[in-house]
Image (cartoon, rainbow, N blue to C red):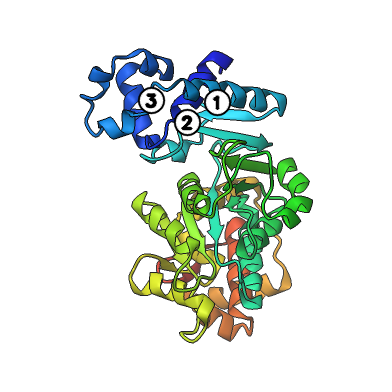
Amino acid sequence: MKDSDLQYVLALQHVPNLGDASAKKLIRHAGSAEAVFKEKKTALLKIDGIGSTKLADLFSAENLKAAEKEVDFIRQHGIETLYYLDANYPERLKHCFDGPILLFQRGNVDLVNKKILSVVGTRKVTPHGIRFCEQLIEELAPLDPVIVSGFAYGVDITAQNAALKHGLQTIGCLAHGLNQIYPGVHQKYVRGVEANGGFLTDFWSTDVFDRNNFLKRNRIIAGLSEATVVIESAEKGGSLVTADIANSYNREVFAVPGRPTDSQSRGCNMLIKSQQAHVLTSAADVVYILNWHSQTAVNAVQKQLFVELEDEEEAVYGYLKENGKEQLDLIALNCRIPTFKAASLLLNMELKGVVRPLPGKIFEII
């Protein structure tokens, strides 16, 4: 995007009280961001949903002046800009009515034809939540998903570090400009994320850091992905806001159940109870609901005619061969394998083209 075009898009983004959904209406009407500023105010006021309050500061000279400074910052720091009408804008976010008209990106991000999963949760993650999160991403790693989160304390950084450990791309959606990192202690992870993924934000370098920014950026986390996973959450929290936004975008939501007495499981239990989220007990649930298995299994069969199985996989295969279709918990019980381990084994066997999942966490030999 040329600097002049970028300046007008930034100027439109800078207008107070306008918002992304209304900005898109103006651009759709006028044909471009630049044309919006050259259109008569009376014509813009005729657009459905655009009132005098939204346009009160549209023609202020401060918008273009501030935009010019931000263009300089963007160019000086090698930041990539993603305009919502351009090909490099994230595909799934294009379908979100309130998705940012402009995103700022740093790193090596590749979202084209990728499986994308957002993983969120409490900053006060429990040891159980950490183990589950790490196990989930380990089990999903053969499918090469992109892991999206908020780079915050707790579940966020656990998920993103687990992604890096298994060589997966990870995207940190920030609640501030790319001129800073919050929390500061996570600065040590920046280089790793930028090497295999990166950071996205719609906040300027001049934006004041505010806790409400976190709620605003959650729409990006929810909008980028096919589904959002909530690992742990109290009765109130940003993760529940992200889940609500994901539901409003008609995306799948998963939540990890916990004991009713566990404070950091109450939010997840509420999502499940109110049918706002699927129960998540293993990676197999994600694979089945998102239908990730079909293409991968076909590819696996095409790649290899003779499949080598590990000892525990052989045991599972032998059990299914003798007993036919069986439910995950019974496979684990009869093979004397923990359920989470059995789910991981079955996922690997599925990738090898040996088994396939059926509704109800049932598996059979192909």
- Residue under the point 65% across and 62% down: 153
State yes or no: discs 2 and 1 in contact (Cβ < 8 Å): yes
In percent of width and height, residue 96 lies at: 39, 41
Nearer-the-camera pick, 355 or 332: 332
Residue 78 screen position, x and y as percent: 70, 27
Determine if residue 84 is in view. Answer: no
Decide which of tag 1 and tag 3 comes sooner along the chain: 3
Left or right of residue 45: residue 113: right
In this view, the residue in front, 359 or 164, is 164
- Depth check, front residue: 54 or 239: 54
Looking at the image, which residue is at 66% across and 55% down? 160
Location of residue 169 in the rendering, given as x and y in whole percent from the top left corner: 66, 46
State the image coordinates of residue 175 (x, y, percent, origin top left): 57, 48
- Confirm or deny contact between disc 1 and disc 3 (CB under 8 A): no
Distance Cα–Cα, label 2 vs label 1? 8 Å
Give 150 or 283, whichever is nearer the viewer: 150
Labels 3 and 2: the sequence-earlier one: 2
Q: Residues within 10 Å of mark 2 (few under 14, many from 20)?
A: some
Image side of residue 296 versus residue 127, left or right: left
Mark 1 Cα within 10 Å, few/some/many (few <14, many 20+)?
some
- Spatial CA distance of label 1 from label 3 is 13 Å
SS of the residue under disc 3: loop
Q: Name the residue under label 2.
A: 14
- Mark 3 to mark 2 CA distance (whole Å): 9 Å
Q: Quadrant of residue 166?
A: bottom right
Q: What element carries label 1?
A: helix
Q: What residue type is labelled 3?
A: Leu
Q: What is the three-letter code of the residue carrying label 1?
A: Ala
| Residue receiving disc 1 | 66
Residue kind at label 2, given as amino acid type: His
Residue holding disc 3: 58
